[in-house]
Image (cartoon, grey):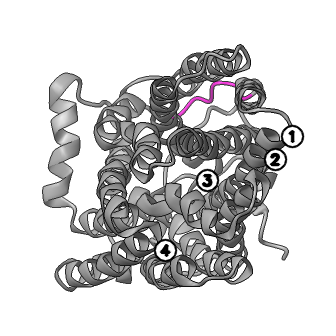
Amino acid sequence: MSNTFDALKVRYFPLIFASGWTWNLSRWGVSFIGPFVANDLTGSARMVQLAGVALWSPLLFGGVVGGWVSDRFDRRKIVIGQFFVTIPGLIILGWIELAGRLQLWMIYPVLFLTGVGWVFDMVGRRVIVYDVVGPEKIDNALAIESSGTAISLALGAVAGGSLIQALSVGWALIFMGCLQVISLAAFTAVPRLVRRQQATAVGASALLEGIRMLRTEKGLISILGVTAFVNFFFFSATPLLQVVGGKFNVGPALLGLLAAMLGIGMFAGSLGIAHYQPRRRGLLYVVGSYIAFVFMTGFALVPLYAASAAFLVLAAVGMGFFGSTQSVLVMDAVSEQHRGRALGLLSSAIGVLPLGMLAVGEIAEVVGASLAITLSVLTGALLMTVFLRFRPEARYMSQAVREPAVETYEQSELPEHRRPDVFNLKPL
């Protein structure tokens, strides 16, 4: 696998990757702990789904604002600043639980603040990655990032469940806060890199410009549509993994292991993209979505723990294809000065997730978690097929043809042999 980890040879990318990995490890741990607490205290699918809504709802409207902020202001400061919101929230909530005063309502604002932090981290960090590695290695870099996210999903779920079983919810939350401290330390070790700063609009007009892209960029619309369907109908069911796993009568550690299958499968799919760097990334993006929809049905319906875990791994392989191609497709679909706003629109498309969680949670209250998941993913596959008949561009998007352009870094920033080339993109 000589080409699998090429981007890690670029200066500063390993630090950015390490920071993103530990941040995601914390986030996925929190995404397990929050629904676990809700399920443990209430046994209600509705309240479990509301925990997911609190974590993911900032993406719905915050993505457009976050994308504009990323294009307009210092991205490094934005990424660093969000830590000073998320870290205190997690540690304080952990101490409250250790003091025996934790109430259900308290988890929701902390989950919401963690979601806000993720919006600014995602739209800031990923554009910084593009600036650092250059267009030649961006496919490889984002596939590596996606692989890291998948592993952090798996380990975060396992760590959350194991820490709850071995210690307590409080110590699990404090541990997740400490992981973010490590992430902050790694990211601050990356110096401010000088990049070509093009003039951008300010104020409300810039925000509206990002929204107006939805009328003019057909390829972007197609990509974002697939993202919205996958998040509304597939990822919206993920908080219910613990509820579905409850039928197997296992403890928190094995519930965490079951949830970790999602990360293991995503890692396998993402690693394949990182190694082979396929040219037809748009096709893999769409096919991966269908793979996830189909095998998630098996996860929900089979009566055995091992078989359920196997189906979840296969569904997650499809999500690995989807996740490792998503961001680079979005960034390649628009001009350089609009990448932050395009990623902001991406996070807003992901932000339909809490709406899906509310819908799936209400359905699960009536028909049960397993049937609710089945209905959700089958409906998603059908509606996405109809959408792609009208907006099929995502299926045909390939690696863009690039030409050399102006360097984005000052001569003093990077050694000549490690300076990434910067390219202009030809229209697809």
Looking at this view, is 304 or 229 the one in front?
A: 304
Whether residue 62 sits left or right of residue 288 in the image: it is left
Q: Would you call the spot at circle 3 few (<14 residues within 10 Å), some (14-19), or many (20 or more)?
A: some
Residue tagged by mark 4? 399
User: To which quarter of the image does residue 314 belong?
Assistant: bottom right
CA–CA distance in space, label 4 to label 2: 42 Å
Tell whether label 2 touches label 1 (CB within 8 Å): yes
Q: Which residues are magenta?
A: 190-195
Q: Amino acid at mark 1?
A: Ala
- Is the residue 50 above or below the residue 224 in the image? above
Residue tagged by mark 3? 421
Q: Would you call the spot at circle 1 few (<14 residues within 10 Å), some (14-19), or many (20 or more)?
A: few
Tell whether label 3 touches label 2 (CB within 8 Å): no
Residue 204 in the magenta stretch? The answer is: no
Whether residue 28 sits left or right of residue 236 in the image: it is right
CA–CA distance in space, label 1 to label 3: 49 Å
CA–CA distance in space, label 1 to label 2: 6 Å
Q: Amino acid at mark 3?
A: Asp
SS label for mark 2 = helix
Compare marks 3 and 4 and give the one earlier in the sequence.
4
Residue tagged by mark 1? 166
SS label for mark 4 = loop
Residue tagged by mark 2? 162
Compare marks 1 and 3 and give the one earlier in the sequence.
1
Q: Residue at x 51, y 43 (%)?
A: 127
Question: Which of labels 4 and 1 is toward the front?
Answer: 1
Numbered label tally: 4
Q: Position of residue 335 (x, y in %)?
A: 34, 53
Q: Position of residue 70 (x, y in %)?
A: 42, 32
